[in-house]
Image: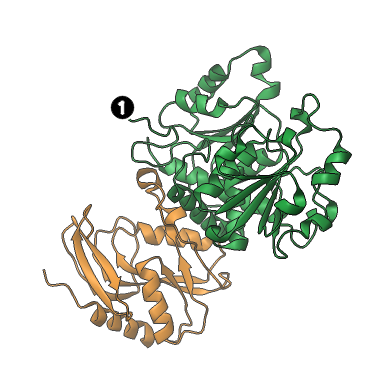
Amino acid sequence: MQLPDAEVVYKNLAAKIQADRGKDFALVGIRTGGAWLAERLHRELANTKPLGLLSTSFYRDDFDKIGLHAQVKPSEIPFEVNGAHILLVDDVLNTGRTVRAAINELFDYGRPDSISLAVLVDRGGRELPIIAQYLGVAFEFPDEKMLELKQDANGKFSFNLYRKNSPE
Amino acid sequence: MINRNPQLNEHGELQHLLTTEGLPSAILLQILDTAESFVGVTERDVKKVPLLRGKSIFNLFFEPSTRTRTTFEIAAKRLSADVINLNVAVSAQSKGETLLDTVNNLSAMNADMFVVRHAQSGAAHLIAKHVRSDIHVINAGDGSHAHPTQALLDMFTIRRYKQDFRKLRVAIIGDILHSRVARSQIHALTTLGVPEVRVIAPKTLLPKMVERLGVHVYHDMAKGLEDIDVLMMLRLQNERMRGANLPSQEEYFKYYGLTPEKLAFARHDAIVMHPGPMNRGVEIDSAVADGKQSVILPQVTFGIAVRMAVMSILTGNQA
């Protein structure tokens, strides 16, 4: 299967957000892939608001099934959420459950004026009424595969497609 | 059959927290790392996460305790669990019910977790062996055996202020003999790689062969505190002191009470810890307890995050 070029997709996504500059977003990346994306967008779009990072571990709805991830990293929201226009950033949008967890968590910091969503890849398979306002590429692939964003030492992105339950 | 650590499930994950003894450093560090995330939660406007929504946690205190019970209660509530506090010392057991009958009754009320404090060493272990495999048990102090969450919050506090365990000299000072806190601290410190752990106490307040735990024994504060980075004070346990282990509290304070003068023997940037409740003027002078080097109140704050971490890690691990 031909995977899209992650760098091309990233630039496409960045350009779409850039075109909407009127909106002075506070960027919030979902760990881990979304956090890399948000960090790079924050830098390259010269966003002036402090960058937020979310770990949705404490808000997941599958905690009873999979437990707590061994390496939970703290959430960091270094700005006032009340009244903020937040752009939530993630790498892959699938069921929408991670985004649901992230939205719930943000509301425990305050009441934002709005939350929009930017994702690199929409792979379909939604189980909740969630859509991305900013999208790099829509790319469907078989259910048993997982798409993972990777970042090399120079900060360049690439995709890795692997079979579920057997990550490389 | 392999004789497995009764706290771990067959995947080597933490199923109950009964003691720090024999726990691998990876599990201790997982608890400390997870607690870091919960410190962030407790600093927000909304100090609650929905992780344990719908779970029932029973605080089973067969021995009086205010601070430990309260911090467990706050931790459970901040995880959105339902908490039921049972002061069993004045309840069913005084009517003659056995420990396991009490536990059976509460299990029948669909408990998900027991937090147990008991005057008998091994009580939490007995309950953990007895309950259904989907119920988790946390030892909140059993006799003079163990108090693992206190030791873990102490480790968390040390890491916050001193970063690297592998470069530290730590002294535990006071009534080691009766102290479940000291035992749990010693096991945690040595597992996390602290190269030198000392105990400082009069002979009458040291267990026999305490050196076997890997500690260096001192009877003199001036010598024992030299080059020390972390001072872990213990409470003089009057209620456990049957007979004459000590001439008098005044005498004890004179030789072992932590005054600014004695603290000066340690490194100038040493931190002073105490698990509470403090006997001011007995094991610690107010000038030290309230002084610049004291981290006694941060210990209490971190205790909540550490207990949140333990509760959520246990709940996430299936039998």
Q: Label 1: few (<14), some or many (≥20) within 10 Å? A: few
**Which picture quadrant has residue A20?**
bottom left
Residue designated by label 1: B1
Relative placement, left or right, of B297 versus A74 is: right
Q: Position of residue B139 (x, y in %)?
A: 56, 34
Chain letter belonging to callout 1: B
Q: Position of residue B189 (x, y in %)?
A: 56, 49
Q: Chain A colour?
A: orange
Specify the chain shown as green.
B
Looking at this rendering, what residue extends furthest in the top direction? B96
Q: How did the renderer colour the structure?
A: by chain
Report the front residue among B280 and A47.
Answer: B280
Q: Residue at x 57, y 47 (%)?
A: B152
Three-letter amino acid code at disc 1?
Met
Q: Position of residue A33 (x, y in %)?
A: 35, 68
Q: Which quarter of the image is occupied by the N terminus of chain A?
A: bottom left
Report the front residue among B50 and B145.
Answer: B145
Relative placement, left or right, of B34 versus A120 is: right
Q: Is residue A20 above or below residue B251?
A: below
Relative placement, left or right, of B118 versus B249 is: left
Q: Residue at x 40, y 71 (%)?
A: A35
**Which picture quadrant has residue A13?**
bottom left
Relative placement, left or right, of B55 versus A131 is: right
Looking at this rendering, what residue extends furthest in the left direction? A1
Report the front residue among A58 and A126.
Answer: A58
Q: Position of residue B162 (x, y in %)?
A: 60, 62
Number of numbered discs overlaid on the protein picture? 1
Residue A115 appearing in the image: yes
Q: Residue at x 54, y 17 (%)?
A: B101
